[in-house]
Amino acid sequence: MAEGTTLLLGALDALPDNRLAGDCALPGWSGKHLVAHVALNAEALMNLATWARTGVETPMYSSPTQRDADIETHSALPAPELRDRVVETAVALDASLAGLTEEQWRQPIRTRQGREVTGEEIPWMRAREVMVHAVDLNAAVRFDDLPGDFLESLVEDIVGKRSGAGLELVATDKDLRWTVPGDTKTEVSGTVAGIAAYLAGREADGLSRPAPPLEPWL
Ligand code: ZN
């Protein structure tokens, strides 16, 4: 999580305001929408940290509509303010997680998608956000730049959520393969970074040959 935050903030620092106002890699979003989302995501995960700490149900967002409206509103803030907010909220999330006791880490909570997890899932949820969105900024970071152990965990995670897609994924740079169950079976081979980008529904230049497109994820 800390490594991903460093990558994201570094990429953001390298991106001038005029590019931040332009498109990012996610359809319909500017870089400012993406940064607003990352800041609001830290606040949403702080709600989950509160849930873990108190045992009182505290959802990430009050509703999907409210989540989207908040991203839209915040994306209109001046770039310097957004840059500050993404740093401040990351620091605040760290602080709220640092205070959790062993028992609180194991408190059952629920993600936005309704998945039952424990507080221990929060750092992984945040790591995914900051790492993948560091790439989505269209700045200096690519999937190839993300840590190898993170990429493998990301592939494992998405493979579990793409059930039905029917894929046999073969890594060309490591002795690894994964199966996504489905009625058909398409073999997709490439670097672990390429497979992770592909599974995340992102542009994947690390594949051996073109593969059937997948919907964006996250
Ligand atoms: Zn996100």
Image (cartoon, helix red, strand yellow):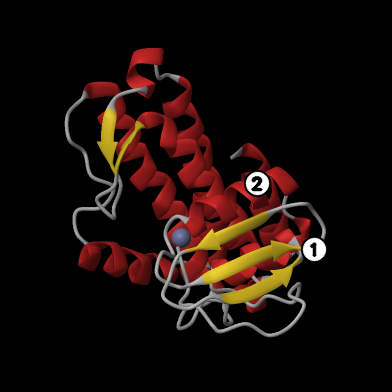
Report x, y in % for residue 215.
45, 77
**Mark with earlier residue (2, 1):** 2
Q: Is residue 173 visible?
A: yes
The crowding category of the residue bearing disc 1, from other C-alpha atoms within 10 Å (few below 14, some 14 to 19, many at least 20), is some
Label 2 sits on residue:
150
Hey, which quadrant is residue 143 in on the image? bottom right
Q: Is residue 169 left or right of residue 108?
A: right
> What residue sits 59% from the left and 67% below the top?
168
SS category of the residue bearing label 1:
loop
Farthest residue toward the right?
A: 173
> What residue sits 69% from the left and 64% below the top?
170
Q: Is residue 133 left or right of residue 108?
A: right
The crowding category of the residue bearing disc 2, from other C-alpha atoms within 10 Å (few below 14, some 14 to 19, many at least 20), is some
When the figure is inspected, residue 217 is found, relative to residue 118, above or below; the finding is below
Report x, y in % for residue 159.
50, 58
Disc 1 residue type (three-letter): Thr
Q: Is residue 194 left or right of residue 121?
A: right
SS category of the residue bearing label 2:
helix
When the figure is inspected, residue 189 is found, relative to residue 2, above or below; the finding is below
User: Of discs 2 and 1, which sits in the foreground?
Assistant: 1
Disc 2 residue type (three-letter): Phe
Q: Is residue 141 visible?
A: no
Mark carried by residue 172? 1
Q: Is residue 154 left or right of residue 63?
A: right
